[in-house]
């Protein structure tokens, strides 16, 4: 690229991450030169002739220019070819699960967001989708979970809330080795069924990249078929919207997903898309501060007498620290995310006291905003998991999850220190 060229004229993948955040998919508006993508608040589009659409715009559920800009931006950030956005992260997950048929099998990592488990176990299981949960830090456990009808492998890394780090390349290798033993689908293409009329003939690997964000990890480059985000979290970054996204490089899979996105209709409005575009412009600088603050707080918590255990991929005490250092990395250097889990000594009552006494850390569900949040997984985000399942995962009554924001880290540490003092 020449020194005088406009970076928006180049392929997004020729630009570095920070430049992609600000420019990818967002050329100045051609009609006015507006530097910010307009908010196209319209439900339909005028056709110059019946069935003739301008650039494919016929109805806003199918396509909206503000959404198109956002989808292009997210595809560039994840080093993908196709981006799709949804009204929530669970709507994005629903789109993936609709690619399966009754009798298909999914391998699910054992430590996932409670809403992920709820959707698979309480909704799609009743539609004939079978699931096996496995500890995906154990490659033998993943292999053992496969069946001839496995069509989906779903994982989070880092996971929620135990911050397990899963080797994406290794899981890809297992899927490829298992491909020869896959039972051919007996599904028939139905007339007019669209892309979904063709059953999945192989297992697809989907990685929920919400905790890392595209700033720290690009699963498509590590072998994933699809990367998923709850954009409510770090991509949105300001606790003011709910949205989800899928990104892929696979043209045929993208066609299936796009067909489902339009058919089901769980798409975000133009204003939410505009807010996300505003947010991705600062993703790289926000994530750097999230990571720096979280690492300092995690190290401080490790030395606190009221804390039994600290779980953070950036600590050498984390069992998968070396893998995290290879797989997660920001444009500025090492970066391990803004999420910390820790176990408060004494169980539920001391943990409850901490949650009630903090002042800067707000007691609330969700994560990834500029402000710091704190929550109790067993009572809040993971209450949908059966108690025995929580216990098996280590989600103890004393476990607390922190979403470290971008405030001054000294104030955050002082807040935690005051809240951890004896009653």
Image (tube, rainbow, N blue to C red):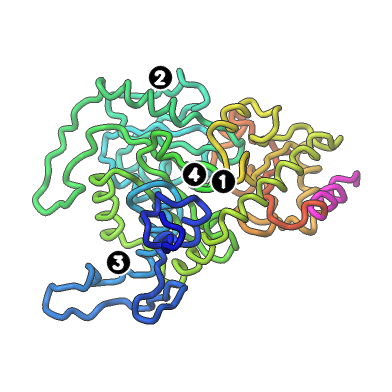
Asked if the residues shown at circle 3 and circle 2 are in contact, with their CB atoms under 8 angstroms apart, the answer is no
Q: Which residue is mark 1?
A: 331
Was residue 409 drawn as part of the magenta stretch in this picture? no
| Mark closest to the chain's N terminus, 1 or 2 | 2
Depth check: 388 or 55 in front? 55
Residue that sits furthest to the front in the current view: 3
* Distance (Cα) linking label 4 and label 3: 25 Å
Q: Which residue is mark 4?
A: 209
* Distance (Cα) linking label 4 and label 2: 24 Å
| Mark closest to the chain's N terminus, 4 or 1 | 4
Q: Residue at x 17, y 42 (%)?
A: 198
* Distance (Cα) linking label 3 and label 2: 42 Å
* Label 2: element kind: helix
Task: State how many labels appear.
Answer: 4
* Label 1: element kind: loop
User: In this rendering, which labeled residue sits more in front, label 3 or label 2?
Assistant: 3
* Label 3: element kind: loop
* Distance (Cα) linking label 3 and label 1: 32 Å
Give the crowd class for mark 4: few <14, some 14-19, many >=20 residues within 10 Å.
Answer: many
Magenta segment boundaries in residue numbering:
411-423
Give the crowd class for mark 2: few <14, some 14-19, many >=20 residues within 10 Å.
Answer: few
Q: Which residue is mark 2?
A: 144
Q: Which residue is mark 3?
A: 63
| Mark closest to the chain's N terminus, 4 or 3 | 3
Q: Compared with residue 309, is residue 8 higher up or lower down, i.e. above or below? A: below
* Distance (Cα) linking label 1 and label 2: 37 Å
């Amino acid at each position: 690229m020449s020194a005088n060229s406009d970076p928006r004229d180049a392929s997004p993948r020729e630009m570095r991450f920070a430049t992609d955040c600000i420019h990818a998919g967002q050329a100045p508006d051609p009609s006015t030169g507006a530097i910010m993508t307009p908010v196209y608040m319209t439900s339909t589009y005028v056709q110059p002739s019946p069935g003739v659409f301008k650039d494919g715009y016929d109805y806003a559920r199918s396509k909206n220019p503000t959404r198109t800009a956002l989808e292009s931006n997210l595809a560039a950030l994840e080093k993908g070819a196709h981006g799709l956005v949804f009204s929530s992260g669970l709507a994005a997950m629903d789109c993936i699960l609709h690619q399966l048929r009754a009798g298909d099998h999914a391998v699910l990592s054992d430590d996932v967001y409670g809403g992920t488990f709820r959707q698979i176990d309480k909704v799609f299981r009743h539609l004939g989708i079978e699931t096996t949960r496995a500890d995906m830090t154990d490659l033998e456990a993943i292999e053992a979970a496969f069946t001839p009808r496995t069509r989906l492998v779903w994982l989070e890394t880092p996971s929620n809330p135990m911050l397990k780090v899963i080797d994406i390349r290794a899981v890809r290798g297992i899927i490829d080795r298992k491909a020869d033993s896959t039972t051919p689908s007996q599904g028939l293409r139905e007339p007019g069924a669209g892309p979904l009329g063709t059953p999945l003939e192989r297992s697809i690997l989907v990685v929920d990249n919400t905790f890392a964000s595209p700033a720290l990890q690009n699963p498509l480059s590590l072998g994933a078929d699809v990367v998923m985000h709850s954009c409510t979290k770090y991509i949105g970054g300001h606790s003011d919207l709910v949205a989800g996204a899928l990104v892929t490089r696979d043209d045929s899979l993208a066609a299936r997903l796009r067909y489902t996105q339009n058919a089901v209709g769980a798409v975000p409005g133009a204003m939410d898309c505009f807010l996300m575009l505003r947010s991705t412009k600062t993703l790289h600088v926000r994530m750097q501060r999230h990571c720096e603050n979280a690492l300092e707080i995690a190290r401080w918590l490790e030395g606190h007498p009221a804390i039994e255990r600290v779980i953070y991929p950036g600590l050498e005490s984390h069992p998968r620290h070396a893998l995290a250092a290879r797989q997660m990395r920001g444009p500025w250097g090492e970066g391990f995310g803004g999420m910390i889990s820790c176990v408060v000594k004494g169980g539920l009552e001391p943990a409850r006291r901490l949650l009630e006494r903090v002042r800067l850390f707000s007691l609330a569900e969700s994560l990834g905003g500029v402000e710091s949040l704190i929550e109790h997984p067993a009572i809040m985000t993971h209450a949908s998991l059966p108690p025995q399942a929580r216990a098996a995962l280590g989600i103890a009554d004393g476990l607390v999850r922190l979403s470290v924001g971008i405030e001054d880290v000294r104030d955050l540490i002082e807040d935690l220190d005051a809240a951890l003092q004896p009653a």
